[in-house]
Amino acid sequence: MTVRFPRPLRPGDRIGVTSPSSGVPKELGARLDAAIRAVEARGYEVVVGRCMDGAGHISAPAPDRAAELMAMLTDPHIRAVVPPWGGETAIDLLSLLDWERLRAAEPTWLVGFSDMSTVLTPLTLLTGMATVHGNNLMDTPYQVPEGLVSWLDIAAAPQGHRFTQTSPGRHRSSGWDDYRAHPEVSTCTLDTAGSWTRLDADADVEAEGRLIGGCIETLCNIAGTPYLDVSSFARNESADGLLVYVEAADDDAFTICRNLHGMRLAGFFDRANAVLFGRTWAPDADSLTQHQAVLDALGPLNLPVIADVECGHVPPYLPLVNGARARLVHTASRSELTQTLRCPPGRAP
């Protein structure tokens, strides 16, 4: 197995929309339509699947969701698959996906974050297929702040493309836009200043490695299983180590601390050269902040830990490509992450 980057999107390509976890309630249908139009405006054809029901916490029974995702990822005419958003229980798909067939299929971009981490990260680890942890479909109409890129830009980039993202220096303080009242909203309010923060020390950081990571609340449940064997991936695809990113959606600091301890004990961080922790709205506890929770769990690794990166649930969104080669630089005057869509040395794309 080797890291495989899907062919770049071209005008006229098809993009599949399905909900491997939660679907879209009827009252948010206008936002879904606006998001589809934003993709179509880039010259792509959008194909919407049948697993889109938003009446409950899942869009359809697990076998149906797994079958539709498999069909889209293995359809040679669909070049990218993006869900409307995450959800709660995408974990029920893992045993239903045909991993051998996915390994043999031509790679297709799979995009998303939150509960989609439960599928994105194993897909890269088990099949070598690069995936994009970034905006979901419903976020796509937002204008991209200076310093960041859209998942559409990444999916359209040629193999070997190198791009650098930096913090815009501002983020949203709380809450989401009301898509019912404003389905066409395209400007995301960024009303609070903030930059990346090194938690473990004050010194400058320069680190490299292949990117892998995702949402703590979802990935912690498959840590130590064959679906999240990060150590084997590192041995085979990045002998000099990884850049690992994690982010907390909404669990309190005690829960995040326990989950990160468990992921560390399961070997998730064993080959990390540095850890990125996404900015979060998740609550602190009375005697433990989210930052302290990260240090409590990951301090024994003696690695640089950079927090408040725009790779979590707090807008804006800094897309990360699982499997991409990356270089992290964090100093008093400069914070940036450069990603390269490149296979391991000596491997064919």
Image (cartoon, rainbow, N blue to C red):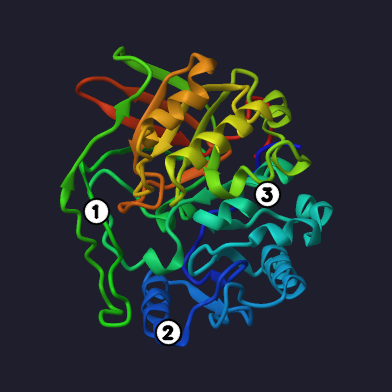
For the residues labelled 2 and 1, the Cα–Cα distance comes to: 24 Å
x then y, percent, for residue 285: 38, 40
In front: 54, or 129? 54
User: What is the number of the mark on residue 123?
Assistant: 3
For the residues labelled 2 and 3, the Cα–Cα distance comes to: 29 Å
Amino acid under disc 1: Arg
Q: Tell me if 221 is positioned left or right of 48 in this view.
A: right
Q: Tell me if 104 is positioned left or right of 59 in this view.
A: right
User: What is the number of the mark on residue 29?
Assistant: 2
When the figure is inspected, residue 158 is found, relative to residue 90, above or below; the finding is above
Assign a secondary structure to mark 3.
helix
2 or 1: mark nearer the eye: 1
> Which residue was labeled with disc 1?
172
When the figure is inspected, residue 76 is found, relative to residue 149, above or below; the finding is below
Give whichever of discs 2 and 1 has the lower sequence position.
2
Give whichever of discs 1 and 3 has the lower sequence position.
3
For the residues labelled 1 and 3, the Cα–Cα distance comes to: 30 Å
Q: Residues within 10 Å of mark 2 (few under 14, many from 20)?
A: some
x then y, percent, for residue 294: 45, 30
x then y, percent, for residue 140: 37, 65
Can residue 45 be seen by looking at this rendering? yes
User: Considering the image in quadrants, where does the N terminus appear?
Assistant: top right
x then y, percent, for residue 55: 55, 83
The residue drawn where x is 64% and y is 61% is: 90
